Amino acid sequence: MTPNTVNKRLQQLQHKTKHQICIEFEDQVELIRQQPDYISEIEPFLNVLKYSLHPCEFQQQINSTMVMALCIQAPLELFHAARVRIFKLACGSFAARNMATRSLPALTCPMIKSSTGMLQSQNNFDLNRQYMVFPTTCDWVVKWRELTGMDKRQTHYMDLPHLRENEQSSNKWLEELYSLKKWLEAIVKKSITRKDIFKAIKAYMDAFRIFSKLIELRRQQRISSVHFAVITNALTYDNIENWTACTGRYILYPFHEKKESIPIFLAGSPIIFPNVKLLTLIEASSMRVAADDICSMERVFPGPACYEDKSEYALMRALSHRYHRACICPTFADNERRLNGMVNVLKNGKIKGVIFHVLKGCHPYDIESVIMENKLKTLGYRFLKIETDYVKEDEQNIVTRLEAFRQTLKQIKKQS
Amino acid sequence: MVNRVRMICQHISFVLLIYGGRLGIHLGSSLPCFACPFVNGCGGHCYLMILQRSRVGFQVTFDYLFSRAGLEVLWPFVVFLLFFVPLSKLWCGWLCPFCLFQDWITMIRKKLGIREMIFSRKTHIRLRPIKYILLVLLILIPLCIANFNLHSDWALPFCRICPAKPILPMFAGNFTHFHLDFTNTVTLCFTALSMVITGGLLVGIFFKERFFCLFCPMLGLMHIFRRLSPVRFEKDISGCTGCGNCERICPVDIHEVHLENEKKDVFMQNCMGCMHCVESCPGDNVLSFKWFGFTLFSSSRNYLSLKRKQ
Amino acid sequence: MLYLKHFLIIIFFLFLTGLIEPASFNRLDLINCMPVHGHMLNSGPYRNKRIPNSPSFYFEHKAPLRETNGQVSQVFSLIFKDNDPDLMDVYFTEDRNPTIYKSSIKDGKVIIRAHRPTVFQLWAVARKGENTFIAHTNCMLFGNSKTKAERIIFFPKTPEAPYIEMQASKQPYWPQTGQEFIFRISSKTGFVRFALPTDLMVLSNNKVFALKSYDRLRYVYTPAHDQYLRKAGVRAGRNDILFTQLREADHCFNLTHTLYVHRSRTAFENYAIGAAVFGASCFFFIGWIILNRKRRTPW
């Protein structure tokens, strides 16, 4: 085959994949719109998420530099302070996943596969000219640049210490943040002042305040899990002020409590739009996710960045702790306290069941599921591990298991 | 909100303890805070001074100490306990005038945007015994003066080097404690030491919030008797996610509250009940201050989000 | 260099314990900002030949002692330079109470006890032939006991013997070197029937000086600073004996007053150097913190 033929075929594949991605997205949006709990206040978030599958269009739409980042450890506030827009490299598209199947190992994490496919499906999008930030969380993320053959000059690695409660690790992570700041300053050719950082923290603090109210509504089972996932997923693509304003408008809607549904806690691998299959199935099984500790949903805000003073060092330290100590990523070695937060929410929300979502190929969460299962069962909570992919074929199987789980929880409710 | 109430309490206490005497108010000589007796017209005296004095303190002979008259040493202690028991170490965080002075200095630093000095956990652990060493010395030295002919210019050894002695009288218009006393080598050394320590601590206070509290023997003394008080600082171990806000926000960088994974009681040695950590904890009811089992203040996610709005 | 720090700390502690003292330490007076009151202030060399050159009957203060029952006792030695007197009485008053109490003398020593904070005035009157010797002093004892000190009321109630009285000082705290004290010849009845002496003498540190009177009735005395007192500690004192002689016909009254002075609490304080040390300390620590900060966290 001549290179021209290869290029032509690639272009065709790109075009096809992009088209499929759009259809997949539209289908999912349409599904949301058809739901009885649909409200028009969710539309701005859906609009934002539309661009999450098309980095090229996203870049054209924004007026500033775009920096792609994987995982939640790269502090959003710093990007905001540098006046660059972050594009979270986390894709939930099944169609995009197909594009990267040939270039990645068979058992690759679906999210990595999907994100790779999404980038490869972009026309006239030179990956080597994109700025990228990689916090070294799981092995897939660490090796992702090499897998995709990206130029390392444009990328910045943040060496994530895998001990959370160790002082040296905290200091190391703080150094990493300073190094990221320097890197961002070099990109924007402008120094990031403490006032910039403070303003950014303040903006995210405002968002956190609204987000707390949103969580309250969720605990009362007033809002749909799919809506919640849409809102939280949009955070990493939207302008924070706009996101806060839209969320503020969303929470003003007079939601009603859905009393008949059974509250459950969702944990495990990230749920990325448009792949909200599990959430839809849970809701279809008359259960409702009242809480979760998924990094793309409730844990996008592990808490506000509390600073002791407004000096640059204090603000950076607050950010460093907020994105390291407060993070519950399963790649951390001393992660026992992750369970504490979960149990606290289970206790306060009177939730009896935990559904653990594992993406096939997402090894850290797979390992974590065993630890969690043992601990939660000891504490008397019901535990259901659902290992799935972005495919839709296993939906019936999942529904059956969810049904059985619901029956168990119902029985417990009756007994108590 | 809590911080604002605390500041109001501290200011009222400052006025009362520094100028109270001029208003005819005197709360006695056994207060569990740095109400410096060297302030002209003060409204009460620090118990540490009484501890070092003759007759009512430890500058007495062993014969006297173990005789019936030696009971006099106990009376100020009983009064000290009467003041201490209801409030425990909240005296430090909420009422001590020297702590307020430190807070003012910190406020200036914060306004200037100068960053705080952060000690490592190891340094904190190393500094911890100092307050107890000072406490033992301020009892041993007066005993040595009375019994082993130690030079009488060693009397009130802690007061001689305490930074509150030159600093707090300034608020009553008295700047005379900034001097070197050339009476003899002992007084010269003590006054030189006092000036060096005051200068060092003042700089320390500027760069590190509540720096003096790391060495305060009063805090050490109160920590010994904290169990007598109904004030408790508790942590719901099962609810802590280890975000580390408590350690970072703590003026004296107590790391045990953050790391504690077994005990409920987290009223640590250096803790002075300022409640900064409770305010900044995002876990609902994870950290709480209790008085006779009644919750005075406990952490909540909502409070934190509202506080940060302010 | 390794041991320099340790060596300096040891030297500092030796200074602190008063075990060593630099030879030039006395010269530190030169840099004091407070004036040093010397012998020559308000006084001059003794020239009066009519008055004996040393006191013959006076009190000498010893260190007060806290007893186990909370009372404080003070021993006074009564020094009588001639042979034993024919008759001797010691009596005292408490605070402003006019009642006069008698005190016993044992081996030339008088003991006064106080169970509460009390200001005492003591008199000792001795007679030898035509000479009457009157010694006077005052002291303050901080007793604190429920056991009351024993008191025997003296008779006659109003002795009219003249004595050297110290007027209340404007200075707070106890008598200190460098302070001004005003004396006059007085009697308990409040008037003097005798011809005033031309001079009032002082025996201080084995040297005798004559005090000048700044009006007809009053004498001013400023006790000199004393190297011994400076070293000895805050409670140490010195017995300065003021004495004179009054004659009436053939009768001779020898009056003494013992002023127990302590070292000055403030005379050797130097504010300028103190502020300089404080400032230097501040600068040193600021520099140290900033340098360390830059070294450890270069960002």
Image: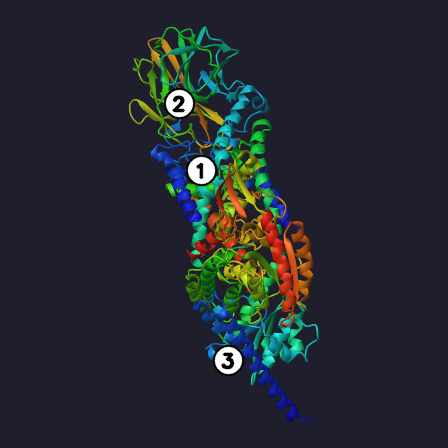
Q: Which image quadrant is residue C196 in?
A: top left
Disc 1 designates what residue?
A: B35
Mark carried by residue C201 = 2
Disc 3 designates what residue?
A: A57
Task: Identify the residue at image location x=31%, y=13%.
Answer: C189
Q: Badge 2 sits on which subunit?
A: C
The amino acid at mark 3 is: Glu
Secondary-structure class at tag 1: loop
Q: Badge 3 sits on which subunit?
A: A
Q: Which image quadrant is residue A131 in?
A: bottom right
Secondary-structure class at tag 2: strand
Query: Mark 1 and mark 2: span between their CA atoms?
Result: 47 Å
- Label 1 neighbour load within 10 Å: few <14, some 14-19, many 20+: many
The amino acid at mark 2 is: Met
Secondary-structure class at tag 3: helix
Image height of A212 relative to C161, above or below: below
| A87 on left or right of A100 | left
Q: Position of residue C281 (x, y in %)?
A: 50, 50
| B274 on left or right of A70 | left
Q: Badge 1 sits on which subunit?
A: B
Query: Mark 3 and mark 2: span between their CA atoms?
Result: 109 Å
Quadrant of the image containing the C terminus of chain C: bottom right
